[in-house]
């Protein structure tokens, strides 16, 4: 639908006609500036929301919040009034001064943290608005002004630095001649810096002012518009909601000038009619074009049709088949786009899983992390993981799936937990092992699951999978401790005995960690803690007795070997840090100065002494590993590979 | 300087038994004939006669000497130590009043008596008057001779029947310096420095005991061959060695860490035995008595060592050190292997001297099996020469009728070797360098010195499997080794004839080589070729010739010394240790 607000006069009329609008806008803008936020709870501002929604001055809602749309002129109109009041001066009628005013106002509302740009697109839209205001009310030729700004002027005056980008926002509202407009827009398309802004503007142009957009499109057609890749596509995309039939025909007709522009246009139209879809799909099926430039656009075409709600099912099915056909092409750009766009298709889990082996056959599995981000359910991912662990055992590189796993956890938490619980209590040891690895693969923590949702056997299996050789006890403890409230006494007893076993691995940390999750006012919890403390006491007596025996103390009798061990370990860590630093983005930005003595440093340019900060993290290590790493690792593998409850089940 | 070192050493003898131990050594080198020592009278009331000896006094008169020793908490004469029950006063009165008979010395009862109060402290001023008054009363004719300088001429014109003297720390310092330390230990600045370092550094963590070893070597150099020394010099030689062994033992025990004693004293004992062999003295009873006294210090040190550690070692992973951190990945198994080697050596030594062997070996087996069961470090060889510990365990179990336990142990070792390879691609280092092993464990890098393409340990294990009839284990281990393409062999020493033939510069016999250092050049590597058929391999192994040698050490009844030589110098056991085993027949 074309915009209701094309001029400053339109804004004035609205404000005069509807006094609530300026009041609500002013209220929300001031609140926004005061609280440094752009969204408001609908519930709290119900009246403002409903009224401004009616006037189409809000952005699409996100959950229970709404935000003002500064792309709408009346919002900027109200903003300008607030700005003049806050800055205690009117917007100057000169373009450079007006942009300076907008800049100062923007900085003012960022205070006290001027580097925090909390207001998203407000600044750019406000600058575009003041230019339009000068154009409408002060008859300033904005196009001429923008074209008169040289690179040198931009360097000297910060207010002019992004004038060309700002111009793209005001472009659809200017009343310039078509010829001037064409010259201006093609000028922007020729400049790599402004090309994207220009294309966006052309796309928006159709929605804001379709008549002038259509005129400019016709002008481009009759001139050298085909030279500019994407120009017609964006025009048609913007104009399609106004006249779909015409745009579809225009898009198809484009093949006479350029197959690439044609397939691009028909790919990017947001179809709202199955007739149009059938037409363009049939058209593409009749084409015999095989240039790689053409083929590279087909993934967008097929995937956008699949995602389109108006596409008939049989065409969607055909699109999936055609995607499959494209996988045989060896062009890397096409392949990259194909797998990425297929992954972006919403839902269609089964069809996407059918395509997966074809993508995997390429031999590069890096795409897997993103492939599942638009799946409707984590079942497919877990099914793939199951297959991977069954085929490759412990050698599966879970890094290939970490983002996919975290993505599914974010999207479908309940279902994810169910799948993970199934893994953790599976008949097959390797699948339980996979479950543990998946659970612990969350960055900086573990994925939360509620073990109490399992039956007795499942809960016992979880304890057996997780506790004998825990991979990260700190993250595991909050989850596993929930089992102390299990309905089954066998589970509670097993949990307690396994925790007692862990004292040898983690010393008193186990008692501390367990204590954090217990409520000693509860009889059962108190008993668990008492038993643990009792076991720890015995352990401590034994440990202290050992420490008194100097004959067996390596610090007394084997110090050179001990020192060699830790010296080599230090060397190892230093080399590892060196490797990390070499690949570090920060290391490329920063100058590296190694400190060889001192707890702080200064530079000639900054005489202040900077003290070294301490950055550290600690992770509990299972002490049993140092007793017998071979057996520890072997037991770990056996636990992961061999301990099956029912041979062959679940395969 | 010399006196200060000696005085500090004597003052440091904080336990009364320590002075009891070294004082008789002094008396012997001073020419006294010792009739009774605290060890002999242990457990019996001594009545003020800790040591009874016959000797010639400064007045050239042969006398009975009753030495009353006060050390430890009683070393200083204070009002308290003087007057307490069994204190100085009471002891002197008892020494005077109770008679001591010795039928083996016919003239003993007729000799005049001299009571000597020996204490490694001083007479406090606040009790001096009381003490002097007491001596004047009890020994009226010799009161004037209670003097600080005991060796000054006695001014008493007529020899009394009952005399008294007091030897305090200063006098003891003079005596020890003059009669004992001057001959071998404190002969020049180098030796004094070395001795000082031994005393100061013995229990410092980084000590590699090189000062101790140099000092011992120096004493041997100084002594030269037996032919060049007289009776007294030889006595001093043995006693000096015994003294420094004792010093190490004493300092280690004071520091509650007998590890230094375990590492140092065997060196002296083996070196003394090597010297005895070199000088063909093993049949001289006097010499053997001296040697036994030297060995006794080691036995005592090991007894204390195992009394301190065995209860802990018998606990679950008792040989693992909680404060070792990640180093224990290597430290624990290496320590455990060494521990069981010494334990078995100690047990075999005990068995040699214990009459109730059956009862003793039951206890030993029980302890050993407990240590093995609770310490998987004892089954994890990191070095090829951990074969020594493994062979000793297997033989000890087999000798004591525990063949099934021996098989279980061997199975465990085999399992550990295979798991170590499957988990960390690690096989024991044939170069026997702990540094290489640590590097491999920490950095996952094999140093150029790491040698795992040839293994004696695996060769030995497979031959044990043959003699123990472990068919299944043999086959699975053989399969494992075949994949790794490892050369198998054992070390066989040259006999004396071969030494002359292949190493003409080596003038020592095989036995002397074995007793004095680790054997490396002094033998050859004999290849072992596996057979697919176990019976064929078994027959081949049992039929193989074994190295036999007439050890003089064994003839002297000191077979335990051969075990000590293997354990201490880390020379792998020779094939005769297992190829002669026949299950069902005595080993």
Image (cartoon, coloured by chain):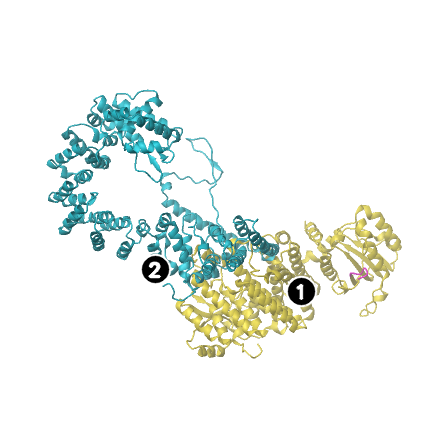
Chain colours: A cyan, B yellow
Viewer-nearest residue: A633 or B253: A633
Chain assignment, label 2:
A
> What is the quadrant of the C terminus of chain A in the image?
bottom left
Compared to residue A80, the image places residue A229 above or below, namely: below
Q: Quadrant of the N terminus of chain A?
A: top left
Q: In the image, what residue occupies the spot 52% across and 65% down?
A: B379
Residue at mark 2 to residue at mark 1: CA–CA distance: 69 Å
Q: Could one spot residue A360 in this view of the protein?
A: no
Subunit of label 1: B
Give the SS element for disc 1. Answer: helix
Q: Which residue is mark 2?
A: A387
Q: Position of residue A509 (x, y in %)?
A: 53, 50
**A483 or B338, which lies in front?**
A483
Q: Is residue B357 above or below residue B267?
A: below
Region rendered in magenta: B46-50
Q: Main secondary structure of the magenta part?
A: loop
Q: Residues within 10 Å of mark 2 (few under 14, many from 20)?
A: some
Name the mark nearer the viewer: 2 or 1.
2
What is the quadrant of residue A57 in the picture? top left
Residue B569 rendering spot, x and y as whole percentages: 55, 64
Percent coordinates x, y for residue A34 in the rendering:
39, 29
Q: Give percent across and percent down for residue A210.
A: 18, 34
Q: Which mark is residue A339?
A: none
| Mark 1, residue position | B296
Near mark 1 (Cα within 10 A), the count class, few <14, some 14-19 or many ≥20, is some
Q: Nearer the viewer, residue A173 or A537?
A: A173
In this rendering, would B158 be left or right of B46? Answer: right
């Amino acid at each position: 639908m074309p915009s209701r607000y094309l001029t400053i006069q339109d804004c004035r009329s609205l404000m005069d006609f509807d006094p609530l609008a300026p009041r609500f806008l002013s209220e929300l803008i001031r609140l926004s500036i005061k609280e440094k936020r752009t969204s408001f709870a609908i519930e709290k501002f119900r009246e403002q929301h409903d009224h401004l929604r009616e006037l189409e001055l809000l952005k699409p809602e996100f959950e229970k919040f709404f935000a003002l749309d500064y792309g709408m002129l009346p919002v900027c109109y109200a903003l300008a009034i607030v700005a003049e009041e806050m800055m205690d001066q009117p917007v100057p009628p000169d373009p450079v001064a007006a942009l300076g005013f907008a800049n100062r106002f923007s900085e003012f509302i960022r205070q006290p943290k001027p580097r925090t740009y909390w207001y998203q697109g407000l600044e750019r839209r406000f600058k575009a608005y003041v230019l339009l205001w000068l154009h409408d009310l002060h008859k300033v030729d904005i196009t001429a002004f923008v074209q008169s700004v040289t690179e040198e002027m931009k360097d000297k005056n910060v207010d002019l630095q992004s004038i060309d980008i700002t111009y793209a926002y005001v472009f659809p509202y200017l009343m310039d001649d078509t010829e001037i407009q064409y010259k201006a827009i093609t000028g922007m398309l020729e400049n790599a810096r402004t090309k994207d802004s220009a294309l966006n503007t052309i796309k928006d142009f159709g929605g804001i002012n379709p008549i002038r957009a259509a005129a400019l499109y016709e002008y481009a057609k009759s001139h050298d518009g085909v030279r500019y890749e994407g120009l017609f596509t964006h025009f048609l995309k913007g104009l399609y909601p106004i006249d779909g039939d015409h745009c579809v025909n225009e898009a198809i007709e484009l093949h006479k000038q350029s197959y690439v522009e044609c397939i691009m246009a028909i790919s990017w139209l947001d179809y709202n009619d199955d007739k149009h879809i059938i037409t363009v799909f049939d058209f593409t099926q009749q084409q015999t074009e095989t240039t790689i430039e053409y083929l590279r656009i087909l993934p967008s075409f097929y995937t956008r049709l699949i995602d389109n709600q108006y596409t008939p099912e049989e065409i969607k099915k055909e699109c999936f088949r055609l995607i499959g056909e494209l996988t045989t092409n060896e062009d890397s750009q096409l392949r990259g786009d194909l797998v990425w766009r297929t992954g972006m298709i919403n839902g269609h889990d089964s069809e996407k899983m059918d395509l997966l082996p074809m993508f995997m056959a390429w031999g590069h599995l890096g795409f897997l992390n993103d492939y599942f981000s638009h799946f409707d359910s984590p079942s497919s991912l877990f099914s793939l993981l199951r297959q991977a662990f069954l085929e490759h055992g412990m050698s599966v590189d879970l890094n290939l799936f970490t983002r996919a796993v975290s993505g599914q956890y974010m999207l479908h938490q309940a279902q994810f937990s169910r799948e993970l619980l199934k893994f953790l209590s599976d008949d097959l040891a390797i699948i339980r092992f996979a479950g543990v690895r998946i659970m612990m693969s969350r960055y900086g923590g573990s994925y939360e699951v509620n073990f109490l949702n399992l039956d007795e056997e499942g809960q016992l299996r979880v304890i057996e999978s997780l506790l004998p050789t825990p991979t990260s006890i700190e993250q595991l403890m909050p989850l596993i401790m929930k089992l102390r409230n299990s309905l089954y006494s066998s589970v509670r007893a097993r949990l307690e005995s396994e925790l007692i076993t862990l004292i040898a691995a983690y010393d008193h940390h186990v008692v501390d960690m367990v204590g954090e999750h217990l409520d000693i006012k509860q009889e059962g919890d108190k008993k668990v803690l008492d038993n643990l403390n009792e076991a720890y006491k015995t352990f401590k007596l034994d440990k202290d007795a050992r420490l008194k025996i100097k004959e067996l103390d390596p610090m007394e009798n084997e110090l050179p070997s001990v020192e060699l061990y830790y010296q080599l370990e230090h060397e190892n860590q230093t080399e590892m840090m060196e490797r990390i630093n070499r690949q570090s983005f920060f290391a490329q930005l920063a100058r590296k100065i190694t400190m060889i003595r001192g707890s702080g440093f200064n530079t000639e340019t900054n005489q202040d002494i900077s003290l070294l900060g301490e950055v550290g993290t600690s992770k509990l290590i299972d002490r049993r590993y140092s007793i017998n790493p071979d057996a520890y690792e072997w037991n770990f593998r056996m636990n992961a590979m061999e301990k099956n409850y029912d041979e062959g089940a679940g395969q | 300087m010399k006196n200060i070192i000696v005085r500090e050493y004597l003052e440091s003898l904080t336990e009364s038994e320590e002075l009891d131990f070294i004082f008789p050594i002094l008396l012997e080198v001073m020419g006294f004939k010792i009739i009774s020592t605290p060890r002999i009278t242990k457990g019996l009331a001594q009545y003020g006669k800790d040591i009874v000896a016959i000797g010639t006094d400064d007045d050239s008169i042969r006398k009975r000497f009753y030495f009353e020793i006060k050390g430890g908490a009683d070393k200083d004469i204070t009002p308290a130590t003087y007057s307490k029950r069994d204190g100085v006063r009471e002891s002197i009165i008892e020494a005077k009043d109770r008679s001591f008979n010795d039928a083996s010395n016919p003239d003993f009862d007729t000799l005049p008596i001299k009571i000597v109060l020996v204490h490694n402290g001083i007479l406090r001023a606040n009790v001096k008057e009381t003490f002097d008054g007491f001596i004047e009363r009890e020994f009226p004719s010799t009161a004037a001779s209670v003097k600080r300088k005991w060796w000054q001429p006695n001014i008493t014109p007529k020899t009394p029947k009952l005399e008294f003297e007091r030897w305090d720390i200063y006098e003891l310092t003079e005596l020890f310096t003059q009669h004992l330390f001057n001959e071998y230990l404190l002969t020049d600045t180098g030796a004094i420095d070395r001795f000082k370092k031994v005393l100061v550094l013995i229990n410092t963590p980084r000590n590699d005991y090189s000062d101790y070893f140099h000092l011992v070597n120096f004493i041997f150099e100084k002594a030269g061959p037996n032919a060049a020394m007289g009776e007294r010099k030889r006595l001093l030689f043995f006693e000096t060695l015994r003294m420094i062994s004792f010093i190490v033992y004493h300092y280690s025990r004071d520091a509650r860490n007998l590890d230094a004693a375990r590492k140092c004293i065997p060196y002296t004992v083996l070196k003394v035995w090597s010297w005895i062999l070199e000088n063909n003295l093993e049949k001289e009873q006097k010499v053997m008595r001296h040697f036994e006294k030297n060995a006794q210090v080691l036995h005592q040190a090991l007894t204390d060592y195992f009394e301190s550690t065995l209860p802990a070692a018998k606990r679950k992973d008792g040989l693992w050190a909680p404060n070792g951190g990640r180093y224990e990945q290597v430290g624990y198994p290496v320590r455990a292997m060494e521990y069981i080697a010494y334990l078995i050596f100690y047990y075999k030594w005990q068995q040699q001297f214990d009459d109730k062997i059956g009862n003793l070996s039951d206890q030993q087996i029980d302890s050993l099996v407990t240590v093995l069961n609770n310490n998987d470090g004892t089954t994890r060889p990191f070095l090829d020469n951990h074969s020594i510990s493994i062979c000793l365990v297997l033989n000890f179990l087999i000798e004591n009728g525990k063949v099934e336990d021996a098989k279980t142990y061997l199975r465990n070792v085999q399992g550990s070797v295979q798991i170590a390879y499957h988990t960390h691609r690690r096989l024991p280092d044939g170069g026997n360098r702990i540094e290489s092993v640590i590097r491999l464990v920490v950095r996952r890098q094999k140093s150029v010195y790491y040698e795992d393409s040839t293994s004696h340990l695996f060769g030995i294990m497979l031959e044990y499997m043959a003699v123990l009839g472990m068919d299944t284990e043999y086959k699975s281990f053989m399969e494992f080794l075949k994949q790794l393409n490892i050369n198998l062999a054992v070390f066989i020493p040259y006999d004396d004839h071969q030494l002359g033939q292949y190493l003409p510069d080596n003038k020592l016999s095989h036995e002397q080589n074995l007793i004095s250092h680790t054997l490396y050049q002094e033998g050859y590597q004999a290849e072992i070729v596996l057979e697919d058929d176990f019976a064929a391999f078994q027959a081949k192994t049992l039929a193989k010739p074994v190295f036999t040698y007439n050890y003089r050490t064994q003839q002297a009844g000191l077979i335990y010394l051969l075990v000590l030589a293997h354990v201490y110098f880390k020379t792998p056991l020779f094939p005769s240790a297992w190829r002669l085993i026949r299950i069902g027949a005595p080993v």
